[in-house]
Amino acid sequence: MTHTCRSFIALLSLTLLFAGGCGSSDAQSNPTSGSAATDAGTSDAATADATRAGEDVGGADGASVAADGGTYADAASDASQGGTPVVTASAKLSVKKTSAVVYGKAVINSDWGKKPGKETDLLLDIYAPTEKSATLRPAIIFIHGGGFVAGTRHHTALVAQANYFAARGWFTVSIDYRLAYAKGTVPEKWGKAADAVGAGQIGRAMYMAVRDAKAAVRWLHANAEKYGVDPNHIAIGGGSAGAYTAVGVGVTNPEDFRDELTTKQDPTLPSTHLDSSSKVACIIDYWGAGTIAEFAQTFGGKSRFDAADPPVAIIHGTQDKTVSFAEAGKLKNHYEKTGAAFAYHPLEGAGHSAWQAKVGGKSLSELAFDFIVVQQKLTVLK
């Protein structure tokens, strides 16, 4: 049995857990599927009590979150086009949330491409500093988990991280993407390959997830000037299925998950900024795996892992019973073989969704902060 096949089987077990609704009391429910995602919980930088899905949370370390609305028109005009992005070591900035921004469209209810289906909007929430910046801002895209069957962009722990980074100078977004119940259009070749390894609908859902997440990255590149974002300093991260997706976005080729379908097969493709880049500068992997990047060889025989891959921070509980800790080692091995940069942080004794874990006394938000700052060579103000 191949490693990719074993990874898919492990993920199918993960999905059964999510579909059964077991897990923490902080699980996020998808309003359409009704399933609960166990990859949720209060983050280290969140307010003491977790907020309900869709409800604003206070900024990290006391930073305020303003009401939705307003524009970012002044962002680009007040930011220098040169120089290294500047962030702060602590939460010094107020954060404004803008909800339900459309980053593209996608097809749903097409029975995986067997019938026309219908179009749906792909949505994200923005968390950004209200203060003006003398330099372009770095950015982070966060992707929720849920076994590709559940979860939303309101995921408590990732919203807390979005606020944590925005309060320190990042432009952050949290995205929704199509889940398995949507049964959107996927390439026939991918679907057959997923069936061949027993992945079925979850394998197909993986394609939709990365297709949509890459569309979000291209949206950010296309709107970088509008929002005052440095397109060379965009990170991506997520937990569980969101980390699978983040690694898939960062490691695969630009044409992967973009060029396999024609606009006749997927008429929503032109809405996804096809001419923009899907490049990211680094990846934050919370208890995920490299399975999707491995399976992308379905599009061609060459491995997608190479020395040009963005640096990845691999953060995984050693007692994870949902996504095996062995997956962290396998991803680490891919990076060691290619020579691409990585950080490896086993969370000793921790299980899945270990948002409260610490490494060397540092929270996961602090760990990700340090990794991004070093890898992207950001300027940090005390």
Image (tube, rainbow, N blue to C red):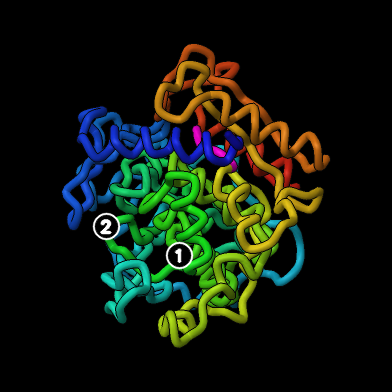
Q: Would you identify the image quadrant in which residue 350 lies?
A: top left
Identify whether 103 is placed above or below 58.
below
Q: Quadrant of the N terminus?
A: top right
Residue at label 1? 212
> Residue 192, percent across and down?
48, 59
Which amino acid lies under the numbered mark 2 shown in the image of this protein?
A: Tyr
> Residue 5, percent across and down?
53, 39
At x 42% / y 72%, what residue is drawn? 103
Q: Nearer the viewer, residue 294 or 151?
A: 294
Q: Please say if the residues under marks 1 and 2 sit with CB atoms less than 8 Å apart.
A: no
Identify whether 300 is placed above or below 329.
below
Residue 36 in the figure: left or right of residue 232:
left
Q: Would you identify the image quadrant in which residue 57 lies?
A: top left
* Crowd class of label 1 (few under 14; some 14 to 19; many from 20; radius 10 Å): many
Region rendered in magenta: 286-290
At x 36% / y 53%, what residue is drawn? 201
Identify whether 15 is placed above or below 22.
below
Q: Would you identify the image quadrant in which residue 120 lies?
A: bottom left
Residue 343 in the figure: left or right of residue 142:
right
3D distance between C-alphas at marks 1 and 2: 15 Å
Disc 2, SS? helix
Which numbered circle lies on residue 181? 2
> Residue 27, percent across and down?
25, 37
At x 64% / y 70%, what residue is drawn? 255
